[in-house]
């Protein structure tokens, strides 16, 4: 059984893409409260990209290389927040252990 925790980074399969949504298998940041995690069949997440936009400070949160074992600098795409089915979550990387 998966142990989903708020603020952990998970690898998720975001296919198929719809409209302006981001796609492919990529890291996502778990935003949903732990009160719902592991009880609810979906989870609120923000996708993470390696296409870093240093000048963007409103719709992006910058993550340094090594955070949660990320191999390169990355951005959390705040404008892509969404709920995904828990079956899309593949594995986790804890921010606390990063």
Image: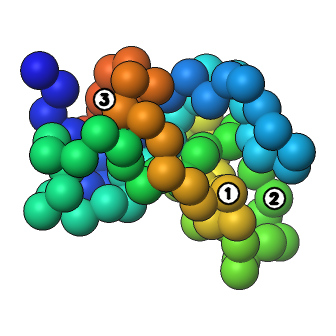
Quarter occupied by the C terminus: top left
**Residue at the spot 79% in from the left edge and 72% down from the top edge:** 56
Identify the element where label 2 is drawn.
loop
Mark 2–mark 1 distance (CA, rounded to whole Å): 15 Å
93 relative to 57 in the view: left or right: left
| Label placed on residue 53 | 2
Mark 3 or 1: the one toward you: 1
Residue 94 x, y percent position in the rendering: 25, 40
Q: Please tell me the numbered disc located at residue 80.
A: 1
If you read the primary sequence from the N terminus, does the residue marked by circle 2 or circle 1 appear first? 2
Task: Work out how far the residue at label 3 is from the one at label 1, CA to CA, in angstroms.
Answer: 19 Å
Residue occupying the point 70% across, 66% down? 79
Please, what secondary structure does the residue beneath circle 1 have?
helix
Q: Quadrant of residue 16?
A: top right
**In the displayed structure image, the side of residue 7 where residue 96 appears, left or right:** left
Identify the element where label 3 is drawn.
strand
The tag on residue 92 is 3
Up-down relation of residue 10 to residue 6 (above or below): above
Identity of the residue furthest to the right in this view: 19
């Amino acid at each position: 059984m998966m142990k989903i925790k708020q603020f952990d980074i998970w690898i998720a399969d975001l296919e198929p893409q719809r409209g302006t949504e981001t796609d492919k298998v990529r890291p996502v940041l778990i935003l949903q409260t732990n009160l719902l995690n592991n009880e609810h069949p979906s989870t609120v997440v923000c996708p993470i990209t390696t296409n870093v936009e240093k000048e963007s400070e409103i719709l992006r949160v910058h993550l340094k290389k090594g955070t949660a074992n990320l191999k390169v600098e990355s951005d959390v795409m705040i404008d892509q927040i969404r709920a995904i089915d828990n079956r899309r979550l593949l594995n986790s990387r804890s921010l606390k252990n990063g």
